[in-house]
Amino acid sequence: MQHEFIRKTGKAIEVLASEILLLNEGDQLPVISDWVERHHFSRGTVQNALHVLRERRAIQTQSRGHLGSYLTVIDYKKLQQFILNGHLRGSMPLPYSRLYEGFASGLYDNFSHADIPLSMAYMRGAKERISQVSQGIYHFSVVSALAATVAIDESIPISILVNFGQHSYLSEHVLLLNEKFTSMQHGMRLGIDDTSYDQQYLTKELARHYNLGLIPTLGQQIIPNILSGELDAGIWNHDQIIDQKYTGLSVQTIHSAMTELSSTAVVIGRSDSEVINTILRKNIDRERILAVQRKVVEGIRIPQY
């Protein structure tokens, strides 16, 4: 009986905190009967939840008689703690480049400063990361603006929450050729990564101009397979070429209107997760993250993620 009481009160606290998070100081507090009707809580459960929020000083209210109660103080950080009930869950690419290491370090620095515990998963393939956000497995993900735009065009229920600007995701995508080639030719074997919106989009765009054989290849295998001769060419992140000092490759610039979007990092969230998205927007300090990223890239700061 006691366990059920605690469970119901805990759920009510989470729901009330989620709704109050979207309000501002000076706004009217919803009446108890409204929460009872909309969420099927008992009146006592709602009263207990409000008591906890007031006791923990997450909110302070002032009664104005028949006009109801108004929010005089809202501690958004405390409300966030009640809502998250643990870690904020995010994902981003494997940090194989200095830019990614810097971004990962910036995220941890940002949320540590905001007193929000962060749990990050690092995985290749924006398609999978976007899918897991749309399913609610992760609260957010870091992807390119191009990947997010393509996914939204495909009616995947995500929203772009923060845009970090050009060259925050990667310096640029480039065309890599086996060193025996100096330019693209008809009949070449070109690697295509079906898990990556960016690489797939740019590869198909290039293939429209040539008669090419598109060979399914995971992104991390594109460089080794070009060097071994299994592929003749492929599109990949220039940062990895620079950071890992690859030789035996001809590197060429890609002329595409989409390269700016593919170099831009964005944070995405699930479209209908209004409360979590509000927490993310309120707490992500774009300039703070970019400053940490720059220091890591320049070797001034040790990566921490």
Image (cartoon, grey):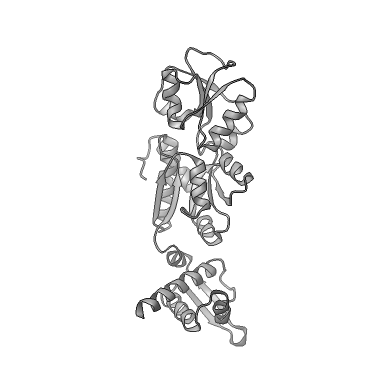
Which quarter of the rendered picture does the N terminus lie within? bottom left
- The quarter of the displayed image where residue 87 is located: bottom left
Q: Residue at x 59, y 83 (%)?
A: 68
Q: Is residue 74 visible?
A: no
Q: Position of residue 262 (x, y in %)?
A: 56, 36
- On screen, residue 138 versus residue 23, left or right, reads left
Does the image show residue 92?
yes
Q: Nearer the viewer, residue 179 or 77?
A: 179
Whether residue 95 sits left or right of residue 237 in the image: it is left
Which residue is located at x 58 percent, y 84 percent? 64
Q: Position of residue 293 (x, y in %)?
A: 44, 41
Locate residue 302, reporting x and y percent: 35, 40
Residue 305 higher or lower than 36, as above or below? above
- Image quarter where the C terminus lies is top left
Given residues 270 and 56, the one toward you in this image is: 270
Task: Choose between 115 and 253: the one closer to the eye.
Answer: 253
Question: Looking at this view, is 299 or 99 the one in front?
Answer: 99
| Res 270 → quadrant | bottom right
Q: Judge whether 279 appears above or below 44 on screen.
A: above
Vertical side of 49 occupied by 210: above or below = above
